[in-house]
Image (cartoon, helix red, strand yellow):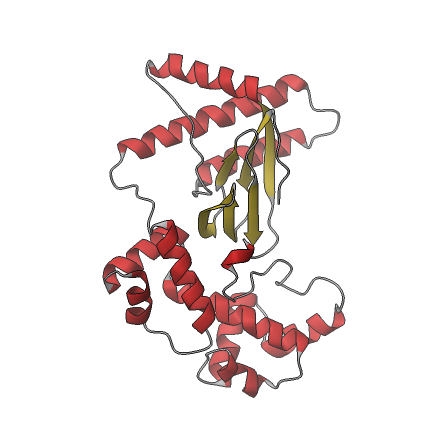
């Protein structure tokens, strides 16, 4: 949970990928794949709480409210129309990621960072976010995907049943939508296909079993929804770069420390109330 700042806006930009589940002021904000360049804005006094699937790199800009107001005023003058800045809610923007990454590299050079550099960087990021928002508003193709309540209902259903065989129809029924519409809206809302999300859930459970128990791979495979040990091993290696056996060995070698690929892994259980 991030601290609530009374006089600053907080702008966070991802410089690597993860899956984020976020609430703001106690209300579900989004659940989606946080891609490179994904951004989120917290206004003064707002309380934000996020869960991340894995450790990631991000940049936080703490912008004084007066600086934000001045930057918005300049954007209004340039656009000759009313301008506001809404929270992108971790919407992917690779160009923003490259821009902020370059600013971070420049700021990491030897010597103190001049205040003018920091102020200019903040104003540039704000101006970019305003421009990107205006472009989205003018494009009818930009939609938010599933409604928040539908998304959380489906995710809870998937997490609760990820060890069983789940059909697209069953998940669509849970959302109250047709199969094709549901699949498209889920992808738009999360940045992940249903198959990818379900596989991530199953692998999360598998990692817990591998790290915490003594079950054999032949036992873990069906327990996590894979139809054979060979299938489980292939998928596990494709996603983690390690075989299940090798991953378990490394997990045991690092007992008491962060497990490989599982430092902040979201547990695939219906725990929406904890968000």
Residue 36, percent from left and from top: 50, 45
Q: Residue at x 42, y 31 (%)?
A: 86
Q: Is residue 252 above or below residue 141?
A: below
Left or right position of 25 against 253: left
Q: Is residue 237 visible?
A: no
Residue 34: x and y in percent read: 49, 49
Q: Position of residue 161 (x, y in %)?
A: 44, 73
Image quadrant in which you'd find residue 251: bottom right
Q: Nearer the viewer, residue 102 or 210?
A: 210
Q: Quadrant of the N terminus?
A: top right
Q: Is residue 44 visible?
A: yes
Within the image, what quadrant is residue 73 found in?
A: top left
Q: How many marks?
A: 0
Q: Is residue 59 left or right of residue 168?
A: right
Rendered view: 28 above or below 239 = above
Residue drawn at x 60%, y 37% is 59
- Could you tell me residue 83's position as x and y percent? 38, 21
Q: Nearer the viewer, residue 115 or 197?
A: 197
Q: Is residue 85 left or right of residue 116?
A: left
Q: Residue at x 56, y 56 (%)?
A: 274
């Amino acid at each position: 949970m991030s601290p609530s700042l009374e006089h600053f806006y907080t702008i966070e930009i991802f410089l690597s990928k993860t899956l984020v589940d976020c609430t703001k002021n106690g209300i579900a904000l989004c659940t989606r794949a946080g891609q490179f360049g994904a951004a989120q804005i917290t206004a003064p006094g707002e309380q934000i709480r996020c869960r991340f699937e894995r450790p990631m790199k991000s940049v936080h800009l703490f912008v004084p409210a007066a600086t934000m107001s001045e930057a918005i005023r300049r954007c209004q003058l340039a656009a000759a129309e009313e301008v506001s800045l809404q929270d992108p809610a971790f919407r992917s923007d690779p160009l923003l990621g490259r821009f902020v990454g370059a600013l971070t590299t420049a700021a990491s050079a030897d010597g103190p960072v001049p205040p003018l550099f920091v102020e200019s960087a903040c104003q540039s990021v704000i101006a970019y976010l305003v421009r990107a928002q205006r472009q989205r508003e003018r494009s009818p193709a930009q939609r938010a995907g599933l409604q928040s309540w539908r998304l959380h209902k489906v995710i809870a259903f998937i997490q609760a049943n990820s060890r069983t065989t789940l059909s697209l129809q069953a998940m669509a029924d849970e959302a109250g939508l047709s199969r094709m519409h549901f699949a498209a809206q889920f992808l738009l809302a999360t940045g992940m296909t249903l198959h990818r999300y379900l596989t991530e859930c199953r692998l999360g459970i598998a990692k817990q079993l591998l790290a915490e128990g003594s079950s054999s791979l032949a036992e873990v495979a069906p327990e996590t929804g894979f139809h054979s040990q060979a299938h489980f091993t292939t998928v596990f290696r494709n996603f983690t770069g390690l075989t299940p056996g090798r991953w378990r060995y490394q997990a045991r070698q690092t007992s008491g420390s962060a497990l490989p690929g599982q430092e902040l892994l979201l547990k695939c259980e219906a725990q929406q109330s904890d968000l």
